[in-house]
Amino acid sequence: MSIQGAVRVNSIREEYEYLGKQRCACGGGWNRQSQALLFDESQVPHDKITVKCAECGKTADFYFDVSAFFGKPPVFE
Ligand SMILES: [Zn+2]
């Protein structure tokens, strides 16, 4: 995935739910390795999450557009 194909989410929880539904080409699930905040050329905040396949060890990067909630205090309902 590239930053241009980032998935727009409304919370960190949505990022993790999205990742939980993705599978490696080998069919294995992804384990989160690291997370970084970066900004695209329009200064839109994105989370980059690097994952590693639990089965084959392949790594991949997923990008999420977090502009919907970036910089806002968490909402407790
Ligand atoms: Zn795999």
Image (cartoon, helix red, strand yellow):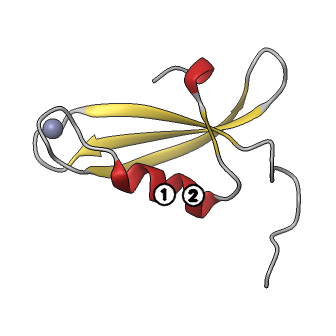
In front: 22, or 59?
A: 22
x and y percent of residue 28 in the render? Answer: 16, 47
Label 1 CA crowd tier, 10 Å (few <14, some 14–19, many 20+): few
> x and y percent of residue 61 in the render?
43, 32
Image quadrant of ligand 1 equals: top left
Give me the residue at 74% from left, 21% from top: 40
Please name the residue shown 46% across and 51% down the image.
18
Q: Residue at x 36, y 42 (%)?
A: 51
Query: In the image, residue 75 lies at what x, y percent?
Result: 82, 74
**In screen coordinates, is 27 left or right of 67?**
left
Provide the residue designation for mark 1: 16
Q: Nearer the viewer, residue 67 or 47?
A: 67
Mark number displayed over residue 62 = none
The amino acid type of the residue labelled 1 equals Tyr
Q: Amino acid at mark 2?
A: Glu
Where 13 falls versus 9 (above or below)?
Answer: below
Residue beneath disc 2: 14
Tell me the quadrant of the picture where the N terminus can be found: top left
Residues at discs 2 and 1 in contact (Cβ within 8 Å): yes
